[in-house]
Image (cartoon, helix red, strand yellow):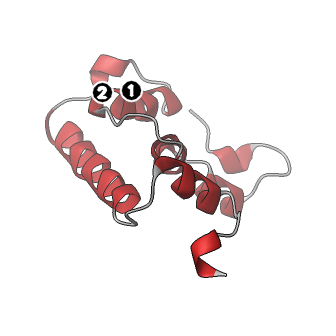
Amino acid sequence: MSAISTIRNLGPATEAQLGPDAAYRAWLLAGLPAHFIGYYVLVMALQDRPWNDCKGDEKKALRVRFEALKAECNASGRSALESALNYFGVLDPRHK
């Protein structure tokens, strides 16, 4: 699979914002349920690989990333709606 930055008008900054972790973070912040298989299937899809190609140490490393994303998204103590609004830049009414 080619890097996102190989697409015309998209560079490294855009590429950094569009990876699987950013996509899954948006998923979690939208209040959708966390599921490890869904996460690693997304990673494999973005690498143009079969979902069941993820094994061994690679799968263990993805599990660590997945758990870190879950912890990051749950650390704020906000509801799913509040987290999503904050993610999209809507002001949090508790912090005016």
Q: Nearer the viewer, mark 1 or mark 2?
A: 2
Q: Which residue is most to the front?
A: 94
Q: Note whether 83 is above or below 42 in the view shown.
A: below
Which type of secondary structure does the marked residue at label 2 adopt?
helix
Quadrant of the rendered image containing residue 13: bottom right
Q: Nearer the viewer, residue 19 or 24?
A: 24
* 3D distance between C-alphas at marks 1 and 2: 6 Å
Q: Nearer the viewer, residue 10 or 32?
A: 32
Q: Residue 60: x, y in percent?
A: 17, 43
The residue located at (49%, 43%) in the rendering is 20
Say whether residue 7 is left or right of residue 73: right
Mark 2 — residue? 37
Q: Residue 69: x, y in percent?
A: 36, 54
Amino acid bearing label 1: Val
In which quadrant of the rendered image does the C terminus lie?
Answer: bottom right
Mark 1 — residue? 41
Q: Which residue is most to the bottom?
A: 96
Q: Residue 63: x, y in percent?
A: 23, 44
